Image: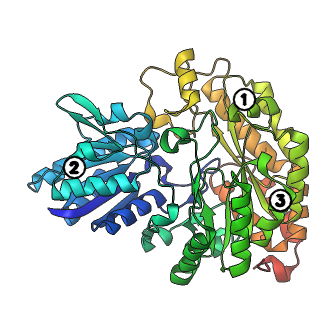
Amino acid sequence: MDVRAVLFVEPLGQLTQPSGYMRTCYLEPITLECLAAAAEEAGFEAQVVSGCVTEEDIRAAVRKGKPRVAGFSVHTYVYDTALLLAKVARETAHSLGYHLVTVFGGCHPSALPGEVASQPSVDFVVVGEGERTLQELLSVVADGGDAHNVRGLWFSENGQLVFTGRRERVCCLDDLPWPKRFPRFLNRAKQYQIAYPPPGRQVRIAQVMYSRGCPFSCMFCSSESTWGREAHWRSPSKVVDEIQFLADRYGTNLVYFPDLTFNANRQKVLDLCEEFVSRRPPVHWWGLFRADLLDKELLDSLAAAGCVKISLGMESPDDDIAQDVKGTYHAEHAGLHEILCYADNLGLIIKAFLIIGFPSETPELIRGYKDLLLDLPIDELRVTFATPFPGTRFYTECIKAGWLPDKPDWAKFTTEQPVLAHPTIPAVELEGLREELVTGFYIDNRYAKHAVSKVTKFPHLIDSWREYFRFLVTKDVFRGREQQAEKLITRLELCVSPARGQHGVHVSP
């Protein structure tokens, strides 16, 4: 046993492979990379296992590194898997003659800490932000000490649950170490969507955080149980320092910002764009935006700074449902049309995140979404099913209304399948409605006209469309309509001159 060795595990189960409707990328395990960096800053050696993690993977990792602590980053849908893997890790360590301490963190344990801490294969639960709590806990385990003095922990002691108190957020994110990057994850990372550069020309794409937390409280999001309602930000210079490092060290040419709401603070976005324009790192980037906080000046700044794509959490094209789901939301259809047309004319790729299956929806309402969406210059759709995750207002409402069983099957909480007992729409019908919506949107002649117009104005994007639609074909999104998808690709290729159509031309901002 090595008392300074830590094993970090993020099981992704069935969602390791991208799908056509929702997960269209494979990204590095940024959470584990942040924790590994924090552990090494405190003098520990970190080993990381992420992806479709098997019991044998865990046995091999424990035998190889003989870690004193195993930390699991746990999404709801892999909670039961993580418990099993933690049990296997402990048993393997026991066979080697020592006790392995298991630690659970992430959105699910932060939402249900008492339940998780009661499990026999879990020693500690870290709630909320993990780095500082982890560092102190590792020192307690390695050097001796009292876990009661480490804020941010839940654990079971003599049959009683102990909570050591909420830890204050890290206000100055610049004080945290950069994530520990692992080439094996970066080498595999791809975004199989309408992106620039397209997948075939992406090089070690990476995730970089600008902020943590979100000031909003959407009914489906568990952010508040993890971060609270306050967002904290890094300094723009430190962000671009990290991006320049990624480009210099690994050749990274595309960065994704996984911030929950990238434009929650308008001035912070403008400040970062100014830093990008000043320094010109050879990297394109994109992030997650709130539609009702966009404006023309902001969009101009984004385009000038190398942003190539804006992903919008629309949730629903229906104004009433969007307002109900997102709380304070002011992007009505008419205003949204104007601002998205402006973004479209700048050449920004526009992706819409939608959720269907809310209890108030009807089949007729969902079928009407296609026309509303086609009235907007949207390039790409991501459609998931309404999923009441623990720690959300939606979860509380569904439990009270009886739309969820007392003991849900957490393995189904992937957002790839319906999990709540919808009051009027059977699950199989909801799945059919999603297929009808997505396929119908892409094969509609109105979408083809939009795509042709955009690629004509911005011919460097031709490969982005070509590769994305061929990816969708391989994922059976166009099941039975593959020829219509190929016709769209042919139309796009015909509108771009051969000299530019093959490799694309892009003038860096």
Q: Nearer the viewer, residue 496 or 97?
A: 97
Q: CA distance from mark 2 to mark 1?
A: 43 Å
Q: Tell me which residue sits at (57%, 76%) in the image.
A: 241
Res. 56 visible in picture: no
Dividing the image into 4 quarters, which one contains the C terminus? bottom right
Q: How is the image coloured?
A: rainbow
Q: Earlier in the sequence, mark 2 or mark 1?
A: 2
**Label 1 amino acid?**
Asp
Q: Residues within 10 Å of mark 3 (few under 14, many from 20)?
A: few
Q: Would you say 204 lies left or right of 452 here?
A: left
> Element under label 3?
helix
**Label 3 amino acid?**
Lys
Q: Which residue is mark 3?
A: 487
Q: Tell me which residue sits at (86%, 46%) in the image.
A: 336
Q: Would you say 444 lies left or right of 395 here?
A: right
Q: Which residue is mark 1?
A: 324
Q: Are marks 3 and 2 in contact (CB under 8 Å)?
A: no
> Element under label 1?
helix
Q: Which residue is mark 2?
A: 101
Q: CA distance from mark 3 to mark 1?
A: 39 Å
Q: Position of residue 87 (x, y in %)?
A: 24, 44
Q: Tell me which residue sits at (58%, 41%) in the image.
A: 229
Q: Would you say 138 lies left or right of 132 here?
A: left
